[in-house]
Amino acid sequence: MKKLTTIIAVLGAYICINGCSKPDEVVPENKGFIRDYVLPSASFLTPAERAEVEAIKEEYRKIL
Amino acid sequence: MRIRTIILASVLALTGTSCKSYLDIKPYGKTIPKTSEEFAALLHTRLNEIDYASDDVMIGNASTIMEFECYTDNLDANLTSYPAGNTMPIYAGTRINNQQSRYEKLYQRIRDCNIIINNFNTQVTEEDKSVLGTAYAMRAVAYYHLLREFCEPFESVSQPGLPLVIEFDMESRPLRSNYGQTMEFIERDFVKAIGFNVKADIYRYTVDVTKAYLAKFYFWTKQWDKLIPYAKELLDNYPLLSGAAYQDMIQAQNAMKGNMIFRSYRFGDQSSNISYSSVKQIVTARPASKAFVDLFVEGEKDIRQTFYFNRIRQTTKNLMACIRTDDMCLMLAEAYAHKNENAEAISYLNLIRSKRISDYEDLTMDNLPPVNSASLIKRDAEGKPLTPLMQAILNERRKEFFAEGDRWYELKRNGRPTFWVANDGRKFVTEPYLYTFPLPRVDVELTPGLIQNPGYTY
């Protein structure tokens, strides 16, 4: 019985060690599946820029 | 007896665990095609995508063209009407993260070509040669698109180029080559493809189409002397059209006519017709910019003005992905201008203008309009301030290839100007770095040493 226990213990240890032969082989951790890059956030228009856009729109309204 | 069973089980367990990488064996020789028909099937899958316009990377479709026009100053984002314009990008940044899939799709085409180039060694029949020639041409064209979209404009051979994948290996993760190596690789593929002299139209990347792409590649990489013979040959073989024949060519939804040598939508099925009509409707939500329409100084004498857009500047021209030899003519004009051979340059400029404008009188070096200080492009592809001649060539190019997705690459090629548009009280700026799309984040994270383009962080 003692011999049997020893064989099972040795066998179990061998399988455990061989079953994890390359612990570093896993894909590096990827934080979820986020693929996006950060983009510059849009700023608010200054009064001068707002006037410029309004002039473009006004010009277009005239041809409608 | 019991001991014997245990020993037997032990031996089996040892045998099983000793073959730890039995699933890692690549199925070489099992899934690779063998006959020319099988290799050709790989190509025809891709060529069908172009014909029916489900392809959006090798030449593009109406949706791709609209997207790229929306990134530019051809259409005025400030005037977008909503909700019709909800699906249109406000500026290039809106879609910048989606461009990663273009990179992946182009490398999928390269993978297919690599399978053929590396495994199909027969060159007995014309069919064999057509298969190989098309594979080389498609690979070169895919790399050419990657070069334009994912590398910065060409300044030096040492700047980052592309990862060169030359064989089918799913585990390979090559780093970026330099620009010079990428250029050499693409040129070599084009030359090999031309050597196969593919004539069968069913392969689409015929010898003439390949030469046209090679000329465009030389144009992008500023190799003016090299592009000239190819562009001249094609222009001679496919002369420019004018008047009704020109309009008919441009507005044909499915037929390839006139001096057009490559296009998507060669055929239309229900799906492609529906998406085409849908895009044509959507694009009317964003009018052409006043600055662009004002370039047509000859008014309705210029046939393009009569059918490119309507009275309220909505696009009525076909949104078309194609190659036609009008491009060769304008590339010749620009190439000669960069070489300071102005007489040749202006002759090609006059050639195309004479085909578009009725009662046309030639431009001369003395009567060229002055440089427009309000123009977005201030410097040419060589970084020099615009001359009246270069301004006229670039303006003509902008007019000729409106709604064909050309302007975005023109802005990138000529100084990557910064400009902004407004939406909902906010200002969206097209910064210079946005002209070069980001490599996929997955690739950058999984490949140590893979250089990302400047400006992209996460």
Image (cartoon, helix red, strand yellow):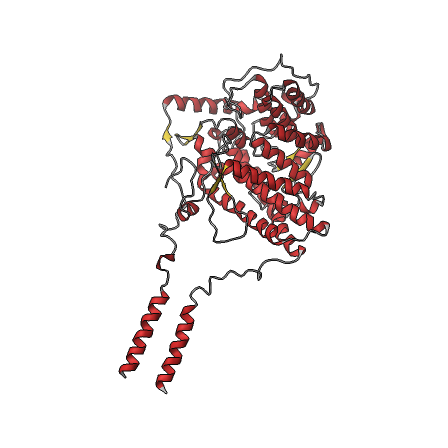
As rendered, which of B171 and B15 lies closer to the eye? Answer: B15
Q: Decide if residue B287 is in sight here.
A: yes
Q: Where A22 sits versus B284, above or below?
A: below
Q: Nearer the viewer, residue B283 or B428?
A: B428
**Residue B142, placed above or below residue B169:** above
Please identify the quadrant where the N terminus of chain B is shown: bottom left
Left/right of residue A3 with respect to residue B25 in the rendered view: left
Residue appearing at x 55%, y 41% in the figure: B143
Q: State whether residue B172 is above or below residue B430.
A: below
**Mark count:** 0
Across and down, in percent, residue B159 comes to 47, 34
Q: Is residue B30 above or below residue A30?
A: below
User: For the view shown, which residue lies furthest in the top direction?
Assistant: B366
Residue closest to the far left:
A2
Residue B271, position as x, y percentages in the image: 60, 48
Quadrant (top left, top right, bottom left, bottom right) of the C terminus of chain B: top left
Q: Nearer the viewer, residue A25 or A44?
A: A25
Determine the residue located farthest toward the bottom in the rendered image.
Answer: B1
* Residue displayed at 63% across by 19% down: B341
At 71% from the left and 45% from the top, the residue drawn is B200
On the image, which quarter does residue B243 sit in? top right
Residue drawn at x 29%, y 78% is A6
> Percent x, y for residue B385?
51, 19
Whether residue B254 is visible, yes or no, is no
